[in-house]
Every structure is written in structure tokens, then in C-alpha cells.
Image (spheres, rainbow, N blue to C red):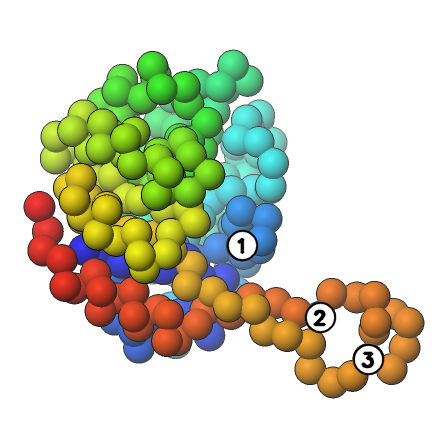
Amino acid sequence: MRVELAIQDSTGALVAQNAGATRVELCAALTLGGITPSQGLVRAVRTLVPELEVHVLIRPRPGDYCYYDAAAMQMLREIDAVLEEGVNGVVIGALTPAGGIDYPLVQRLISQAGGAEVTFHRAFDHLADGEVPDAVSNLAGLGVARILTSGGASSARDGLERLAAMHESADGRLQVMAGGGVGLEDFDAFHAIGLADVHLSAKTAHARGAEPQTEVARTDEASYFLTDPQLAAAAVELGKSFDYR
């Protein structure tokens, strides 16, 4: 199985490369579900690990996935900016207020990507079950390479039925990539339904360092998440133990 790691800093990129990850999704603010990283971070990652396959999240803000003129313009410009840094692909998604895929905007974003690989992100998990088969077919027809999804569940392990249906509906036209609350113990189940791609953050919390000396220091959140080298390496090695289908 191909392992994609979600990372939010240049240290994570180094960890991913050392672990042998197939590719990374580069974003900022993973705890908020991810937003577009700064151009400086994208450039730093490309400089540090130029051979690493990097796909950049294009999401202008946290919250819902309904984007109007100003946000849509920002997303188009962000695609331009990250492609200038030589990234391999972009990760996009947009919905209508009614909860369906915003196909006109998605088409504009794909066109702006100019042939770079496009992943449709977990906005897909907001779709009702009845909309999924047509959505998979439509996105494949637009040239989307893969859909990152938990199968509409809180964790991909709980969304296996929908993931399997999506894989069957895709029929090789795009890849269905399991992501969302993924643990190493889930790989076997994903492989059993035919998936060849899995996405996880492999993160661990970095605790506070020095003892806080002021009230502000005591109340400010000092911990943050890092990509765990051992977990990342274990995920990649486990993925290699499964063949592709």
C-alpha cells in the first residue's frame, strides 16, 4: 500500500523522506483540519527535500467548504503560488450550500492546476450516501487522481462499507485513499477491500519544555504536534507488506 503522510512543517518533510513515504500532503494547522501552508514553508520543504513528492492543501480557512468569489480567487492564486515552487500536486475540495460538490469551482481549480495531480479532500465526506457513486464518476471524469475519504465516518475504519463501494464505483479511474483517524491496525482492513492508498498524520504531541514562570506562560498552550519518526517508518514498512490491487 502507498502511504501518504500529512505534515505541517519542514521537520515533518524530513521525517517523511527518511521513512520512505510515497508522498506528503503539506498543510498548516492540522488541528483545525488543515489550511493552505505559507509559500515560505512550501519553498523550504522543496529546498530541503527536493525529491519528496509533495501535494499541497488548498483550503483558505477552517470551517465549511463553501467558497464565494473572494475565497475562490484566493484558492486560484494559491494554486499558482505553490506550483511555482515545483510541487507535484494540489489537494482541493468545494461544496455548495446544499451540501453537494461545487463542480464549477472544482473545474476552475483543476484547470488552474494545469496538469498537476489533483486530490479531492475530505469535503467528500459531507456527501450523502446516495450522492457518492455519481460524485466518484464525475470527479474521475474531471481528471481527479484520488479522493481522500473516511467513508463518511468519524474514522476510516468505521467507513469501510462506503470506502469499498467507492472503490468499486471508481473502477480504476481514480484512487480511493483511506484517511481520517487511521491507525496501523487498520491497514489490513483497507487492503482487504482493495484500497492501495492510505493517509495518516503519524503525529505525536510535543509537551511543554521549561517550567512556566508567568501567568501568561501557564495559560498559553505550549504543546504542539510533530510527525513521529518511529510511527511514520512503521506505517511505511507496513504498507510495503501489502501488494497493490
Image quadrant holding the N terminus, namely bottom left
Q: Residues within 10 Å of mark 3 (few under 14, many from 20)?
A: few
Residue 2 placement, left or right of 92? left
Please tell me which of labels 3 and 2 falls first in the chain: 3
Q: Are marks 3 and 2 in contact (CB under 8 Å)?
A: yes
| Circle 3 SS class | loop
Instruction: Please give the name of the residue rendered at 53% of the width and 31% of the height, measured from the top-left corner.
Output: 65
Q: CA distance from mark 3 to mark 2?
A: 10 Å
In front: mark 3 or mark 1? 3
Instruction: Please give the name of the residue rendered at 25% of the width and 66% of the height, measured from the top-left corner.
Output: 236
Camera-side residue of 231 and 38: 231
Corner quadrant of residue 149: top left
Q: Is residue 216 among the parts visible in the rendering?
A: yes
Instruction: Please give the name of the residue rendered at 31% of the width and 44% of the height, measured from the top-left corner.
Output: 178
The residue identified by callout 3 is 212
The x, y position of residue 143, in whole percent, is 23, 33
Q: Compared to 74, does 46 lie above or below?
A: below
Q: Compared to 9, does 36 lie above or below?
A: above
The residue identified by callout 2 is 222
Task: State the mark number for residue 30.
Answer: 1
**Three-letter amino acid code at disc 3?**
Pro
> Which residue, as the protein is rendered here, is positioned at the far bottom?
210
Camera-side residue of 141 and 217: 217
